[in-house]
Amino acid sequence: MTDLWDNLKNTPYPIVLYGMGNGADKIIKVLNERGIEFKGIFSSDGFQKPGKTFHGFPVLSLFELEKIFGKMTVLMCFGSNRPEVIENVKKIKQKHLFFAPDVPVYGDILFDKNFYLSKRKEHDGVLDILADGISKKTFENTLKYKLSGNVDFLFDCEVSEIEPYGNFFKLGDNETYLDLGAYRGDTVFDFLKYVNNSYHKIYAVEPDKKTFGKLSRATENVKNITLINCAVSEKTEKGNFVMNGSRGSNISDVGEEIDLICVDDIIENNEITYIKADVEGAELEFIKGAEKTIKTKKPKMQIACYHKSDDLINIPKAVLNIRSDYKVYMRHFSSLPSWDTVYFFV
């Protein structure tokens, strides 16, 4: 068995990076560790500036690198669900070898062939418990993508964001919704759309102060909503949080002191019917801090599973250890790399 990193050692075309920032830093680190050389960096049109460099390379356009190298092996170094970005990726794929390396958003475990082989039985176990054919295909394609970096596996299994709600994830007129990682209100308004503005209560949790301000302004006319400026965790206590006003904000050993809160303390004795959790790598901590809520109330749950390499195994295991009677579904929505890949628990 080979993986992307093995194959890059033997690629016949010069390796170039598409994009800069934290994602590129992580990919460059793996390339350096494995003795794989890259030859250049480009960004999307409009992002080049005269004299701009990244890791010692001038940041050029794709056209400029094509004039230098001809056909290339392109590595995507950022994430996006924007349709225009994904269409651009498809155009690049028509001319060049194209891969989107899977490097963990959080944690140090790389999903390579050694990791996959060490966890193969556990991956097989998750596949066995998934509740429908789309879930099984999504899981298998996600594994294939993570090993190969081939984005065609993601294109082949993606569904529209409304598909679960018209299929197995039914929302009624009296839902109480807990939005963990509410960001600027995007998923609050998604919820309102799916319930036709008929619901009992919304709790929206967002830890980043700057983003929380935007959430507050966006939802000021939303009825029966409680906004909570905390980070969700296993326990209610003080902690540190890196705040950068983006989806990359996260609990850390460094950063600004912030209140951490567990779901059991948010809900206490109140009703809860639906939880969405996209909490930047703290999904397991959320589950541990929601044990009483999950055990006694069995809310429907949507949990992101793309932040850490072992999320695919650990998240369903943690939930089913609390309540074994959940049905587990998996879906991937349009996004590169395998972001916006989620488990649903019903």
Image (tube, grey):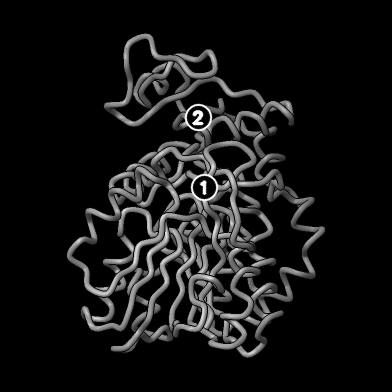
- Report x, y in % for residue 97: 51, 39
Give the class, few, some or many, for how many residues have Cα within 10 Å of label 1's Cα (few <14, many ≥20).
Answer: some
Label 2: state its secondary structure: strand
- Report x, y in % for residue 22: 52, 33
Which residue position is annotated with label 2? 17
Looking at the picture, which amino acid does disc 1 mark?
Answer: Ile
Residue at x 39% of width, y 47% of height = 80
Residue 273 found in image quarter:
bottom left
Residue at x 41% of width, y 67% of height = 179
- Report x, y in % for residue 2: 73, 48
* Position above or below: 146 against 196: above
Residue 168 found in image quarter:
bottom left
* Position above or below: 284 against 99: below
- Please give left or right for residue 37 compared with residue 213 in the image: right
Q: Earlier in the sequence, mark 1 or mark 2?
A: 2
Q: Given the current orientation, which residue lies at the most extreme left position?
A: 221
**Which mark lies nearer to you, 1 or 2?**
1
Which residue position is annotated with label 1? 258
* Position above or below: 75 against 262: above
Looking at the picture, which amino acid does disc 2 mark?
Answer: Leu
Q: Given the current orientation, which residue lies at the most extreme right position?
A: 118
